[in-house]
Image: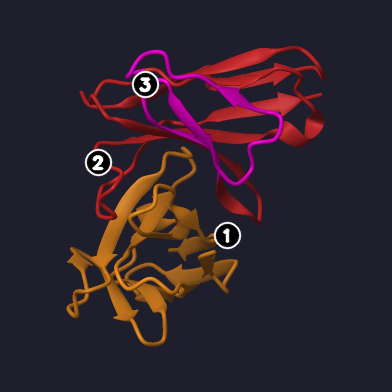
Chain colours: A red, B orange
């Protein structure tokens, strides 16, 4: 089944404790992206990757890192999480990002709480 | 920068009735796509419908249709014969040949029996 998976689905952590949220897709998509969703703000892009070893900042990159060592994986790293990073996180991928029609497939979301 | 505005934070509709969710956007691009995503309580993002800007004809997917007014930069979603399973948060989104989807803030739809 074609899908985007994220782990963990739920995470409660404390300020300053490094964490990684994994994202994997099995559709051989070139483009992958991370969004965060906050009440009243919709979804905002954090980082994206056009292909292996190519990453770039989205609208809200502060406090986050990403890497793209393999085509299928795009982990989101919070080196020193803070309470304002408490949010719902989505990973997404698409086959051909240069086509505006290209559908983005979303993972199931990761609910992160930073105490 | 492109912006997407959903002016209705919450809407309510009775089962079997029709409801329209509003969306406006701001862009200087001529070629772009517009999308409506549904987010049920499971939080999964589900693509409901998409519209190509250069197509005059409004997109339709079963009970879901759009009213695309390009000059007015308006892209509303009409849900006909509403069902309890339609209750969800609905997001309007815009995309050009750039990479990110630009989302509105969402409209929460309640469906009452």
Give the numbered dot on residue A96: 2
Q: Residue at x 25, y 41 (%)?
A: A96
Q: Residue at x 36, y 87 (%)?
A: B71
Q: Tell me the CA gap for discs 1 and 2.
A: 26 Å
Answer whether labels 3 and 1 touch (C-beta < 8 Å). Answer: no
What kind of element bears circle 3?
loop
| Boundaries of the magenta span | A45-72
Answer whether labels 1 and 2 touch (C-beta < 8 Å). Answer: no
Mark 3 Cα shell of 10 Å, populated few (<14), some (14-19), many (≥20): some
Residue A81: give x, y in percent of width and height.
Answer: 75, 23
Q: Tell me the CA gap for discs 3 and 1.
A: 31 Å
What kind of element bears circle 2?
loop
Magenta region includes residue A43: no
Task: Between label 3 and label 2, give the one nearer the viewer.
Answer: 3
In the picture as drawn, the residue positioned furthest to the front comes out as: A54
Query: Is B79 left or right of B94, judged from the image as shown?
Result: left
Name the residue that disc number 1 marks.
Answer: B105
Q: Is residue B88 above or below residue A10?
A: below
Q: Foreground residue, A31 or A23?
A: A31
Task: Between label 1 and label 2, give the one nearer the viewer.
Answer: 2
In the picture as drawn, the residue positioned furthest to the bottom comes out as: B71
Q: Residue at x 51, y 35 (%)?
A: A56
Mark 2 Cα shell of 10 Å, populated few (<14), some (14-19), many (≥20): some
What kind of element bears circle 1?
loop
Q: Tell me the CA gap for discs 3 and 2.
A: 14 Å
Q: Foreground residue, B30 or B39?
A: B30
Name the residue that disc number 3 marks.
Answer: A52
């Amino acid at each position: 089944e074609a899908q985007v998976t994220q782990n963990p689905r739920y995470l409660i952590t404390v300020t300053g404790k490094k964490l990684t949220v994994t994202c994997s897709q099995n559709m051989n998509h070139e483009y992958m992206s991370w969004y965060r969703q906050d009440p009243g703000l919709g979804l905002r892009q954090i980082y994206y990757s056009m292909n292996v070893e190519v990453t770039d900042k989205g609208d809200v990159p502060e406090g986050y890192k990403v890497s793209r060592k393999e085509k299928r994986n795009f982990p989101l790293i919070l080196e020193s999480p803070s309470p304002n990073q408490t949010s719902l996180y989505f990973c997404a991928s698409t086959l051909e990002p240069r086509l505006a029609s290209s559908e983005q497939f979303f993972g199931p979301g990761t609910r992160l709480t930073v105490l | 920068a492109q912006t997407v505005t959903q002016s209705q934070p919450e809407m309510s509709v009775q089962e079997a009735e029709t409801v329209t969710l509003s969306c406006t956007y701001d862009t200087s691009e001529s070629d772009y796509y517009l999308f409506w995503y549904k987010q049920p309580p499971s939080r999964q993002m589900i693509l409901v419908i998409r519209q190509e800007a250069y197509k005059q004809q409004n997109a339709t997917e079963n009970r879901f249709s759009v009213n695309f007014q390009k000059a007015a930069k308006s892209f509303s979603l009409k849900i006909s014969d509403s069902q309890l399973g339609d209750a969800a948060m609905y997001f309007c989104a815009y995309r050009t040949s750039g990479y990110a989807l630009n989302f509105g803030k969402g409209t929460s739809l309640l469906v009452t029996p």
